[in-house]
């Protein structure tokens, strides 16, 4: 009896109105990216305000197309949820029968999941096409997602034209990070500067504030840790691995671009105007010393690795605890002279040997010397490449003014 009931039930199925072959529904991922999905691009472009920075004229990752089977028919496409996105519903009216229409649906992403993506993986997105509430066809689109740390630098289209995405560096600069308020408070307690004034005073005051950030980075123990310049997951893309602000803070490791992002984030928070200069396989920081952005100073952020203040402080404290008398002070003086005497002026070295320079003053003197050297380090390169930085035809050299780019892209965070 069961087969008969099933057969009887089949007679009441609603007959199909629209032929899938006639509708010819298609769903695809942006061909430029060769099935590589970059969470950072989605998060950075979530607030994109200038289409000239986009991947193409539509700034879209996915496209759907179909032939209208009837005039004024209603199209509805649902995109099922995955670990990266929520269920998404797209709906449009198809005015003219027989015309092929193409649309670029905006997917509802799980931004918190995108932000936390640190390993590559695969996701299958299912697109279901309905016409006038009738299910017509289903298409699956597979994407290979990358780590959120992978920043897209450039894409070469099939015609050989390179599309520049280095503006995405600005999305990693995050002056809104919740850590920064406590960092700024710590900076004012260090003794390099007493207050944060931004551009309210003179250029010397601006430099002092940047030096205070520099001293904080040394005290934090942020050191250089190299990561490959670029990776090439496809034949047409270049990618740079960038650590987020909290990753640099917690791991205390940074390559050239990581450190630029870290410093620039704090600078932005206190009202300064940073610039990131990008050269082939290297980046260094700049900042304007005046609010009108007429004069720029440079900073080679990787030179924080020239010293190790946490270890230095630990050695000092352990030695003084074991030898609290004059013998301990003499031992400390000799050890410090051997390791760090080259970073002290003759006057400061004499004060240190005579016990007239405190340990904190000793560290600040070392920090100042390295800071000055870091300010001068990239000057020759900058002077030699100044024209390239302002050339729109050269993608190898970029001058990324973070304040200007904020008009285009906002910081990446878990709620983008």
Image (cartoon, rainbow, N blue to C red):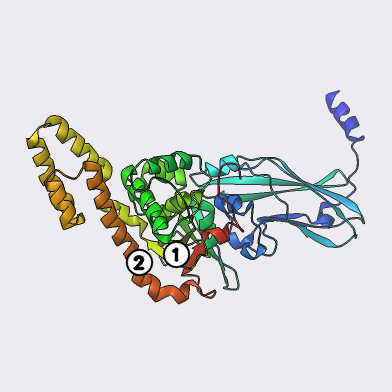
Q: Position of residue 74 (x, y in %)?
A: 87, 50
Q: Which residue is mark 1?
A: 277
Task: Say which residue appears at 44% left-offset and 74% top-offset.
Answer: 386
Task: Say which residue appears at 64% left-offset and 56% top-offset.
Answer: 48
Q: Residue furthest left?
A: 327
Q: Residue furthest front?
A: 201
Q: Is residue 111 visible?
A: yes
Q: Give the structural element (helix, strand or loop) at label 1.
A: strand
The one of 294 and 408 positioned closer to us in this rendering: 294
Q: Give the structural element (helix, strand or loop) at label 2.
A: loop
The one of 127 and 391 positioned closer to us in this rendering: 391
Give the image quarter of residue 33. bottom right
Left or right: residue 340 versus residue 298 is left
- Whether residues under marks 1 and 2 lie with C-beta atoms below 8 angstroms apart, the answer is yes
Q: Which residue is mark 2?
A: 378
Give the image quarter of residue 221. top left
Q: Is residue 242 visible?
A: no
Left or right: residue 157 versus residue 207 is right
Q: Is residue 82 above or below residue 201?
A: above
Q: Is residue 62 above or below residue 297?
A: above
Quadrant of the image for the N terminus?
top right
Q: Residue furthest top?
A: 1
Q: Position of residue 127 (x, y in %)?
A: 72, 47
The one of 64 and 369 positioned closer to us in this rendering: 369
The one of 286 and 98 positioned closer to us in this rendering: 286
Cα gap from disc 1 to disc 2, whole angstroms: 10 Å
Q: Position of residue 196 (x, y in %)?
A: 44, 48
């Amino acid at each position: 009896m069961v087969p008969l009931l099933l057969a009887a039930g089949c007679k009441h199925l609603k007959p199909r109105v629209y032929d899938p072959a006639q509708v010819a529904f298609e769903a695809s991922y942006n061909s430029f990216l060769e099935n590589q999905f970059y969470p950072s691009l989605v998060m950075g472009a979530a607030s994109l305000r200038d289409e000239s920075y986009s991947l193409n004229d539509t700034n879209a990752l996915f496209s759907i197309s179909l032939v209208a089977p009837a005039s004024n028919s209603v199209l509805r496409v649902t995109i099922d949820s995955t670990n990266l996105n929520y269920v998404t519903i797209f709906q449009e009216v198809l005015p003219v029968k027989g015309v092929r229409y193409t649309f670029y649906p905006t997917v509802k992403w799980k931004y918190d999941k995108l932000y936390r993506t640190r390993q590559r993986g695969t996701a299958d997105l299912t697109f279901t096409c309905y016409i006038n509430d009738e299910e017509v066809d289903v298409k699956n689109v597979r994407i290979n997602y990358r780590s959120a740390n992978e920043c897209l630098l450039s894409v070469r289209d099939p015609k050989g034209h390179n599309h520049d995405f280095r503006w995405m560096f600005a999305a990693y600069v995050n002056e809104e990070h919740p850590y920064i308020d406590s960092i700024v408070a710590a900076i004012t307690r260090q003794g390099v500067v007493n207050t944060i004034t931004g551009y309210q005073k003179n250029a010397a005051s601006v430099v002092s504030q940047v030096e205070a950030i520099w001293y904080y980075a040394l005290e934090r123990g942020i050191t250089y840790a190299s990561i490959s310049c670029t990776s090439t997951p496809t034949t047409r893309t270049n990618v740079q691995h960038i650590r987020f602000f909290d990753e640099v803070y917690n791991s205390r490791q940074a390559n050239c671009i990581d450190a630029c992002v870290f410093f620039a984030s704090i600078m932005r928070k206190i009202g300064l105007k940073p610039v990131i200069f990008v050269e082939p396989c290297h980046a260094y920081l700049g900042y304007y010393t005046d609010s009108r952005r007429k004069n720029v100073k440079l900073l080679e952020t990787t030179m924080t690795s020239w010293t190790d203040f946490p270890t230095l402080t630990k050695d000092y404290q352990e030695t003084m605890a074991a030898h609290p008398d004059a013998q301990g002070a003499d031992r400390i003086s000799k050890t410090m002279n051997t390791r760090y005497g080259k970073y002290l002026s003759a006057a400061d070295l004499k004060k240190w040997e005579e016990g007239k320079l405190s340990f904190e003053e000793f560290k600040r003197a070392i920090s100042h010397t390295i800071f000055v050297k870091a300010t001068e380090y990239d000057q020759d390169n900058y002077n030699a490449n100044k024209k390239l930085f302002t050339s729109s035809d050269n993608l190898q050299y970029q001058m990324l003014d973070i304040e200007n780019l904020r008009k285009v892209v906002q910081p990446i965070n878990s709620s983008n």
